[in-house]
Amino acid sequence: MLSELEADDPELAADVRAAFEVGKHCTMATLRADGAPRISGTEVELTDGQVFIGTPEDARKALDLRRDPRVAIHSPTRDPVGDVWAGEAKFSGVAVEVSPGRFRIDVTSVVHTGLTDETPQRLRIRLWRPVRGVETMFRA
C-alpha cells in the first residue's frame, strides 16, 4: 500500500519515510476488547512498498490486532531545531498477520505534518488516501 503513495506523490512518500527514520520507537493505537484505545510502543519496517510491525505473539497489542485489526501508528518525533524539522507522520490501516507476531499494515491513510519552505514558515499537513489522493492543508 505504501507503494501506491510512492506512485501518487513521491515527495510525500519520501517525507513520510524520513519522519519514520528519525528514530526507532513508534507509537501504535489498537482497540481493547471493551473498545477502549490502547497505546503501545512498536517498531515499523518499511520494505518493498509495504509497512510491517513485529510483536511477541502473546503481546496485548497482537491480541488486539487479531480481534480488531484497525490500527494507527505514529512516527517517532523530534523537536524542531531552529527552522529544521523532519516533521511527523501517521499511518492508519488494517493489520494482517503474515506470520506469528508479524503484521503487514494495509494502509488506508497517511498524514505528514511538516513545515513549508516559505518565510515565515507555516505548518503543512498532507493527507493521502487511496483513490482520493493527496489533500494539503496549511496553518499559520
Image: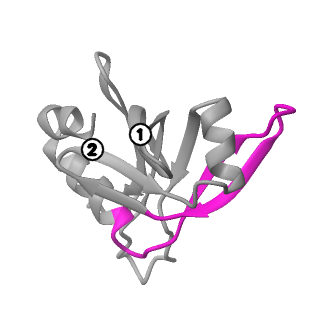
Q: Are marks 2 and 1 in contact (CB under 8 Å)?
A: yes
Please name whichever residue, 81 or 32, is drawn nearer the observer in this view of the structure: 32
Among the two numbered marks 2 and 1 on one chain, the one whose residue lies closer to the N terminus: 2
**Left or right relative to 82: residue 10:** left
Give the left or right position of residue 19, taking residue 2 as reference: right
| Place of residue 58 in the rendered image (x, y in percent of width and height, measured from the top left) | 66, 55
In this view, which residue lies farthest toward the top?
131
Residue 123 seen in the current view: yes
Residue with the mark numbered 1: 105
Instruction: Give coordinates of residue 128: x percent, y percent.
Output: 35, 32
- 118 or 93, which is in the foreground? 93
Secondary structure found at label 1: strand
Residue beneath the point at 31% across and 22% down: 130
Magenta span has 112? no
Number of numbered discs on residues: 2
Q: Residue furthest bottom?
A: 81
Horizontal arrangement in the rendering, residue 119 relative to residue 95 (left or right)? left
Q: Nearer the viewer, residue 99 or 67?
A: 99
Which residue reaches farthest right? 34
Q: Amino acid at mark 1?
A: Ile
Characterize the local packing of mark 2: few (<14), some (14-19) or many (20 or more) Cα atoms within 10 angstroms. Answer: some
Residue 17 image offset from top left, x and y in percent? 28, 58
Mark number, residue 50: 2
Q: Could you tell me if residue 124 is visible in this image?
A: no
Residue 72 in percent (x, y) is at: 56, 43
Q: Establish if 38 lies above or below 45.
A: above
> In the picture, which quadrant includes the N terminus?
top left
x 51%, y 77%: residue: 79
Instruction: Give the residue drawn at x 67%, y 31%.
Output: 67
Write down the region rendered in magenta.
19-43
Question: Which amino acid, by three-letter code, is at mark 2?
Answer: Gln
